[in-house]
Amino acid sequence: MTKHDIWRIAREQSAEDMGCIPADFLSEENVVVPFRLGAGARKYLKEPISCTLASYGSNVVAAAREEVADMVAAYIRRYPFYHCFETPHLHWLNEKLTERGHKVCFMASYYLPDIQRLPDLACPYETRLLTQGDFGDLYKPQWSNALCEKRKELDVLGIGAYHKGELIGLAACSADCETMWQIGVDVLPAYRRQGIAAALTSRLAREILARGKVPFYCSAWSNLRSMGNAVKSGFVPAWVELSAKPAEVVDALNEVE
């Protein structure tokens, strides 16, 4: 699999997630299309979604429901595309969305492997290749980034680090769509800052590529530790996304139990 293949597959998946065409992400002009969650969309993307904005670095592609499409189009015309994912301009977008019963919800950065520099990093502890059958008793809070109990049927492959027989680090991937598997990683606090996360992530990325799938990695923009791990593991920034949902959905997510 070449770099060209990896980025092409990612754009094809983003198009399936939004309802546009892959070439839209290569345009120098911003693009607005009706939002459509395709049959092959990433499995964790759930309706209702009011709009999604994405950029691979050339423009903004916005997929929007009819009730907010005009306002979203006005937003991406109003500011340079690279400012559409940051404050203070996001305040304008959120205020306009709120007037129509919607709010900005999720924002994230996504990374793809640079196969020309995907490192083979040494782990200071024993490592083991894990498959779905090995995850049964690992759905615990300390492994919640690597594994997802709500979608455990999608957790397909992992690399564990062990000290004296105890699992102390885990990178695992979820088959979130047909062509791309998402990596998450956890390391127990006492074992951090030893390069374990990067060693596990980079090895898992190579294992995924060997199976003909594209590994991808996601982080919050403020999670410097996660971003650093992505870069050290051989990943590069690929695209950014912002989505909005109905206000009642966002408000429910903000409730503190």
Image (cartoon, rainbow, N blue to C red):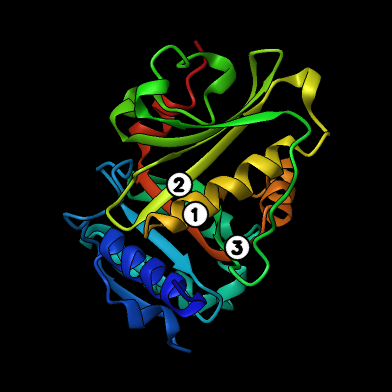
Of label 2 and label 1, which has the lower sequence position? 2
Lower position in the chain sequence, tag 2 or tag 3 = 3
| Left or right: residue 41 compared with residue 188 | left
Say whether marks 2 and 1 touch (CB < 8 Å): yes
Give the residue type that dot 2 points to.
Answer: Gln
Residue at 46% x, 70% y: name it.
75
The answer to which image quadrant residue 66 occupies is: bottom left
Is 153 located above or below residue 182 in the figure? above
The residue indicated by pointer 3 is 89
Is disc 2 placed on a helix, strand or loop? strand
- Label 2 crowd bin: few (<14), some (14–19), many (20+), radius 10 Å: many
- How far apart are labels 2 and 3 at the CA level? 30 Å
Q: Nearer the viewer, residue 116 or 70?
A: 116
Quadrant for residue 32, please give it. bottom left
Q: Residue 189, located in which quarter of the rendered image?
A: top right
Residue bearing mark 2: 182
- The percent coordinates of residue 84 (x first, y second) are 56, 67
Amino acid on which disc 1 is placed:
Phe
